[in-house]
Image (cartoon, grey):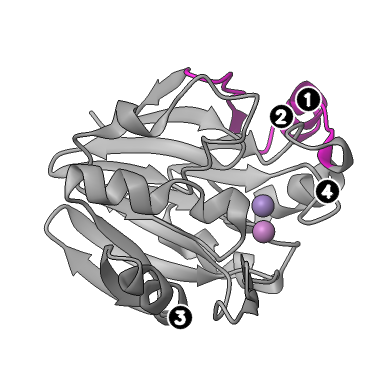
Amino acid sequence: MAKLTFLGHAAFALSGDGLDSVIDPYLTGNDLTTFKPSDFGNVNYVFVTHGHADHIGDAVEIAQNAGATIVSNVEICSYLSALGAKCHFMQVGGSYRFPFGKVRMTPAWHGSGIRTDEGMIYGGMPAGFLIEIEGKKVYHAGDTGLTMEMNLLADDGVDVALLPIGGNFTMDIEDAVRAVPMIKPKVVVPMHYDTFDVIKADPVDFALRAAGMSEVNVLSVGESLEF
Ligand code: NI
Ligand code: MN
């Protein structure tokens, strides 16, 4: 069985045969999470969708402590490699077959600049991930608006889709509801809401409106889904 645990915001732990990973591990600074970087001393991969601080988060600390490989785009990997992290460089639209399964970086309609003390650094194209584990497919949309590219995922047989619903920086509930029949996932888990004032959203409202198109599973922080 593969296992997905919600860590708050857009952060998830995903594990299965050959994979023990975190995605967008924004833990330090997130008052709504109960997790800390030291909880993930055994991960072998860290996925980073784009360069914003609420997604890179604790990626470097977790990867270095655990000896894990960060998977992200070329620009973010270049930046994080210089900080001492081990990285697997990819690019949007590209797929790679890892020992645990195939991973594709999917398009996201967003930004990816990396804010540093010296100003904003170019973080390449923002992305999502389609991650295959134990023959199942998990789609983490990253931060994105509603895009036509989501239609392409309908042919992939997505088992679990993690979709932002908080609005302002990403899709809101209305747009996330429109995304569901485009992606056609078996299960949807809402994410990227409530962490900041401008992304307040009610996941139960999303669940009611998406019901009938897909199973919706609202995970509270620390809650897991097995599939
Ligand atoms: Ni972002
Ligand atoms: Mn974000």
Span of residues in magenta: 199-222
The kind of residue tagged 3 is: Glu
SS at mark 1 in the image: helix
Horizontal relation, residue 119 to residue 172: left or right: left
For residue 67, say whether it is visible.
yes
Seen in the picture, residue 90 relative to 138 is either above or below; the reply is below
Q: How many marks?
A: 4
Closer mark to the observer between disc 3 and disc 4: 3
Q: Are marks 4 and 1 in contact (CB under 8 Å)?
A: no
SS at mark 4 in the image: loop
Q: Nearer the viewer, residue 14 or 153?
A: 14
Q: Nearer the viewer, residue 176 or 166?
A: 166
Q: Which residue is mark 1?
A: 208
> Which quadrant of the rendered structure holds the C terminus?
top left
Determine if the magenta segment contains residue 20: no
Residue drawn where x is 82% and y is 41% of the image: 199
Q: Using the numbered discs, state the Cα–Cα distance from disc 3 to disc 2 in whole angstroms.
A: 38 Å
Mark 3, residues whose alpha carbon is within 10 Å: few (<14), some, or many (≥20)?
many
Q: Using the numbered discs, state the Cα–Cα distance from disc 2 to disc 1 in whole angstroms.
A: 5 Å
The kind of residue tagged 4 is: Gly
Determine if the magenta segment contains residue 201: yes
Seen in the picture, residue 84 relative to 38 is either above or below; the reply is below
Q: Which residue is mark 4?
A: 167
Seen in the picture, residue 54 relative to 212 is either above or below; the reply is below
N-term mark: 4 or 1: 4
Q: Are marks 2 and 1 in contact (CB under 8 Å)?
A: yes
Residue drawn where x is 61% and y is 35% of the image: 29
User: In which quarter of the view is residue 145 placed?
Assistant: bottom right
Can you tell which mark lies on residue 211?
Answer: 2
